[in-house]
Amino acid sequence: MAVYILSNRKIVRHKGEKADSFSSDEYSIPNFRIAKCNFDTYKEPTAAAKKEKDYTNRNILDYKLFSEPEKQGYEEVLEVLQNEKGIKKSTLTANNLGGTQRMFYELYKNMSSTKDRSDVLIFIHGYAYDFDDELKAIIDLKKLYIDHPESPVEHILFVSWPASSSLVPLTYFDDKASSINSGSSLMRLFYFYTQFLKDIFSNRDLAPCNQRIHLMAHSLGNRVLQSMLYSLKRENILRVIDQVLLLNADVSYKVFEDSEDSYNKLPLLANRISIYLNRKDTVLGISQFTKNILTPRLGKNGPSDIEKLKDIVSVIDCTFVEDDILNSFKYEVGNHWGYLSSSVVQKDIFQNLYGIDRNLITVRLKNNENIFTIIS
């Protein structure tokens, strides 16, 4: 099990700390860094601890930034792996690897060491998260997708981008700009990963792990994904993602149209795309009428036209589900966090991640060929 943070937040050294940290400042930088979370010493905080002013940063969850790689590319990763297999002697070890080199190396080692499912979930959060909120979200995601026995996920890559910490609608425009910048970081990660695959598996001594990678984007996190897709050139896209889950997506309902030239590339990247929507989503209703010039949102209204993509893209209507896990005022009124608040939505997601045929997922009613309704 491993949880990583990929972030284009500024790097700072807080007073009294010996290690660099990610900043909660609300702006992005051009490059991203990777950190690994440490759950070995994690203890569930008490209610009193959560109220303390110092319940921030590593007091929420410990993490360590990877060093920057000394050399670009993944030839040194290949050399370390060959040395470990006794194929080629080398003085290099995993400690010589940095950044994506170290993360890809660790994931490959872990995912290829078992015959059981050991999937990776890439998660992109939505609107109004500061870095402390992200750390809390990582803890929730681990409980839900790694610790849960019905989930095939063993590893999480959390995409941290500097959204505003305020729920004031005007800050949405700052978040929109940050999401565009962060999409460039996600695009670089995609290209690094495809380069890793080419550098490592062009060698016949190493075999793919045959595990799966999934991508999940919630709310305005879909804008990060859209920014990445805008920049990807079709001829450079490899199908390296199994399931893409678009949760309460705060992007235009037209994103799959060819004129947008963004989400219509997803079928080149993934085996299956699932749009989870809620027609009572209050947050997306506010987004539509205050920030997006009355443009219907994908996660509330569904896509405008996916006729050409209906074999790959499914629409899952969560309007009628109940929030039986988290049922505070925020969740009941917002109808925006079903993947966290509803056990029925979670059960649908688990079956989706396992790759069960969309017509056989047990909590759905089939409306037509590719449109379903989740029932409580």
Image: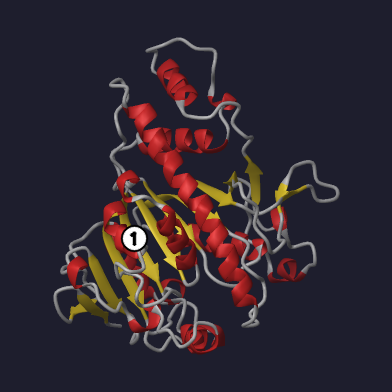
Neighbour class for label 1 at 10 Å: few (<14), some, many (≥20)?
many
Residue that mark 1 sits on: 244
Q: Residue at x 40, y 52 (%)?
A: 232
Quarter location, residue 25: bottom right
* Of residues 303 and 35, the one drawn nearer to the viewer in this rendering: 303
- The quadrant of the rendering that contains the C terminus is bottom left
Q: Residue furthest front?
A: 259
Looking at the picture, does residue 5 appear above or below residue 73? below
Q: Residue at x 21, y 77 (%)?
A: 371
- Secondary element at image label 1: strand
Where is residue 297 shown, x and y percent of the image? 41, 80
The reply, left or right, for residue 184 in relation to residue 364 is right
The reply, left or right, for residue 256 in relation to residue 229 is left
Where is residue 64 shown, x and y percent of the image? 65, 43
Looking at the picture, does residue 315 appear above or below residue 288? above
Q: How did the renderer colour the structure?
A: secondary structure
- Residue 186 visible: yes
